[in-house]
Amino acid sequence: MRVRQFTNSLSVALSQDHFDQIKQITDPPGTRKVVAEDQYAELLKNGCAEGMRNDSATKLAGHLFAKGISESEVWEILSLWNSKNDPPIDYNELRRTFDSVKKLESKNEHKKIDVTKFLDNSEKVITEHEESYIKIPFAGHNLSQLEIRMNGGLIGGRFYLLGGIPSASKTMIVNNLTDNICVNGQPVLVFSYDDGKTEFRYRTFARFTNYTIEDFNQKKLNKDDMSRICLDATIDKIMKFKYVVEEIIPIEKWEDLIDQIKRLHNKPPVIMIDYLRKLRTENSTSDERLRVDNILSNLTGLAKKHNIPVLAISELARDSYKSGQRLSMASFKESGTIEYEASWLGILAAVEEINGEYKLKNNWERIIEQDGNIDLIVYKAKRGTGVTGKIPLKVDKDKMTVTDREEYNVVDNAESITRQSMFGARRN
């Protein structure tokens, strides 16, 4: 019935508009045989006899798709044409032909590149100039100097890579950044493939209460204690903006997670990854270098597409752990690709500077464990991500905090997170 109604209303249009359009078509080379343009008009007017129907249906459907006519219109036109055949093609058979051509044309369409997109024009220039410049503050009360050295926050469209020696508190600093960002009302999507969701939770609780991380790990708190903690204003806000994923989800499926969070908060999330080599893609390969290259390419693509910062924790090569070892970008296991893909590269370690080079201190394990002194060496800072050089930090592994080391001796002008709550003043 629908086809018949369409036939009556479209008969004039077919003989005028669509015939005129079809006569202007030139078949894309390599996709189908070129058929004389007047034959398409003849085919639509008169249909065809048995023996030529399937071949004609394939050519006609492909011809219409190539013109850019919508899927629904192509189907209606093909159905109208089929009604003129003697006899008509069976409905299911015609639908299979249509779906097959549609799939082929879809593949061909994906392969086409419009060269005009590489040209500049005034509209594009003005749009990009006025595009919102995303900068996500992360200092909180504890990392104002780090934030200053990183150009005031994490920048949208940038990929940050953070490495470190063992026990350098890589996950701790990422969790501190995440909490501070969430308190500012910005959602964060954390892929926690090393310590897990519970560990991230307890690290946050230790930061903002009088309890230590071991109090939580050893289950020293009762139900009432945990209830009071969850009611704390700072912790409650963090829990509303901090999305922690433990399930291994291929990067290609992250788009859906980002879109869901964007709908909930009217802004896409900052992405934190702990850690890089545990990520997976749908296109598996036995070549580890190619696999990591694919991961890095996907992460930089996500950052640019959604105009968000993406920060991932990475590993250093084992040789980098030796006392006196010189650290550099080559210390990363992913050395090579990261130098091109990442906008910012930093390494956490206890170092001394000798002749412009940073070398691991001989007693670095004791320094970190007893004194909590750690250095962030920024080796690469491009596209507005800050400056290179050494940034001194201090870690407290009981309270799970990372702070600027006092040798800066400057006033903290960053927006702070209050440390007052139902638990009273909290110690640093």
Image (spheres, grey):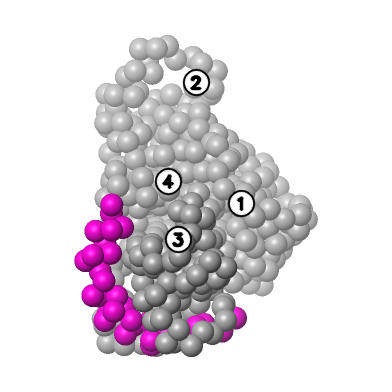
Real-space Cα distance between discs 1 and 2?
A: 40 Å
Q: Which residue is mark 4?
A: 257
- Ranked by sequence position, the earlier of labels 2 and 4 is 2
Q: Quadrant of the C terminus?
A: top left
Real-space Cα distance between discs 3 and 1?
A: 43 Å
Residues marked 3 and 4 touching at CB (< 8 Å)? no
The residue mark sitting in front, 2 or 4, is: 4
Total labels: the figure holds: 4
Q: Which residue is mark 1?
A: 282
At label 3, which amino acid type do we have? Pro
The residue mark sitting in front, 2 or 3, is: 3
At label 2, which amino acid type do we have? Asp
Visible residue check, residue 405: no
Real-space Cα distance between discs 2 and 3?
A: 78 Å
Task: Locate residue 423, reporting x and y percent.
Answer: 31, 24
Task: Identify the element where label 1 is drawn.
Answer: loop
- Ranked by sequence position, the earlier of labels 2 and 3 is 3
User: Image quarter for residue 427?
Assistant: top left
Q: Which residue is mark 2?
A: 215
Task: Locate residue 281, reporting x and y percent.
Answer: 61, 52
Q: Is residue 178 magenta?
A: no
Give the main secondary structure of the magenta stretch.
Answer: helix
Residue segment shown in magenta: 1-30
- Ranked by sequence position, the earlier of labels 1 and 4 is 4
Task: Identify the element where label 4 is drawn.
Answer: helix
At a point 26% along the width and 71% down the height, the residue shown is 11
At label 1, which amino acid type do we have? Glu
Task: Identify the element where label 2 is drawn.
Answer: helix
